[in-house]
Image: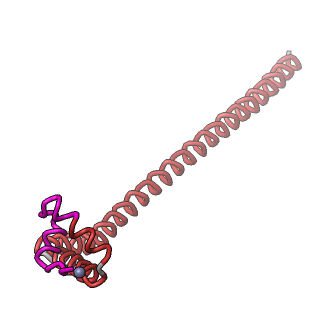
Amino acid sequence: MTHCTKEILTAYYKQQLSNGDELGVENHLQHCETCMDCYLNLIEATEIQQTVSKQFTDQLLVKIEKQVIKPNHSTYKRKQLDKTVRHFLLAAGLTLLLTLAGLFQEVATITDESFLQEQTSITEQLLEKSTGLLNLFKGGNN
Ligand SMILES: [Zn+2]
């Protein structure tokens, strides 16, 4: 039984073998631990090579850049959110203040009006009384 060469195993891994050869290698690998080890090492090496390919390095750099930029971005976003929340709270507070002020004004107006009404009625009552008194005087004089 001849062992598979690295070239054949590589070709097998890259699926470049003819169907017959592929089956032969497959059968051999199932029964030969040495070739299986070799094949596994080859897969590992190829995958590591692929992993450390320029493309991957570029992708990794992009990923790192994104991850480096991301926190800044999220911090910026959080700051924006804080700003928004603060603005909202300010607006809400202002609205509440205005509403309260409006309510106070309304209450004050009501109080003023009722006070004025009361005052008017008191004045009217006094006027009526004084008029009555005047009439009484007048009547008394007459
Ligand atoms: Zn073998």
Is residue 104 placed above or below 23 in the rendered structure?
Answer: above
Residue at the image position 13 percent from the left and 64 percent from the top:
17
Where is residue 42? Give x, y as percent.
20, 79
Relative to 18, say whether 70 is above or below.
Answer: below
What colour scheme does the image use?
secondary structure
Residue 63 in the figure: left or right of residue 6: right
Q: Is residue 86 above or below residue 140?
A: below
Displayed quadrant of residue 54? bottom left
For residue 11: magenta?
A: yes
Q: Between 122 and 110, which is closer to the camera in this rendering?
A: 110
In this orientation, which residue lies closer to the viewer: 107 or 17? 17
- Give left or right: position of 8 versus 87: left
Quadrant for the N terminus in the image: bottom left
The stretch in magenta equals 1-23
Residue reaching furthest front?
Answer: 1
Is residue 103 placed above or below 65 in the rendered structure? above
Residue under the image location 31 percent in, 82 percent down: 33
Number of dots carrying numbers: 0
Question: Is 118 covered by the magenta stretch?
Answer: no
Instruction: Kindly identify the residue that appears in the image at 47 percent across and 52 percent down.
Output: 94
Quadrant of the rendering where the C terminus is positioned: top right
Residue 12, position as x, y percentages in the image: 17, 68
Name the quadrant where ligand 1 sits. Answer: bottom left
Q: Residue furthest right?
A: 140
Percent of width and height locating residue 89: 47, 56
Of 86 and 56, which appears nearest the observer? 56
Name which quarter of the figure residue 87 lies in: bottom left
Which quadrant of the view contains residue 59?
bottom left
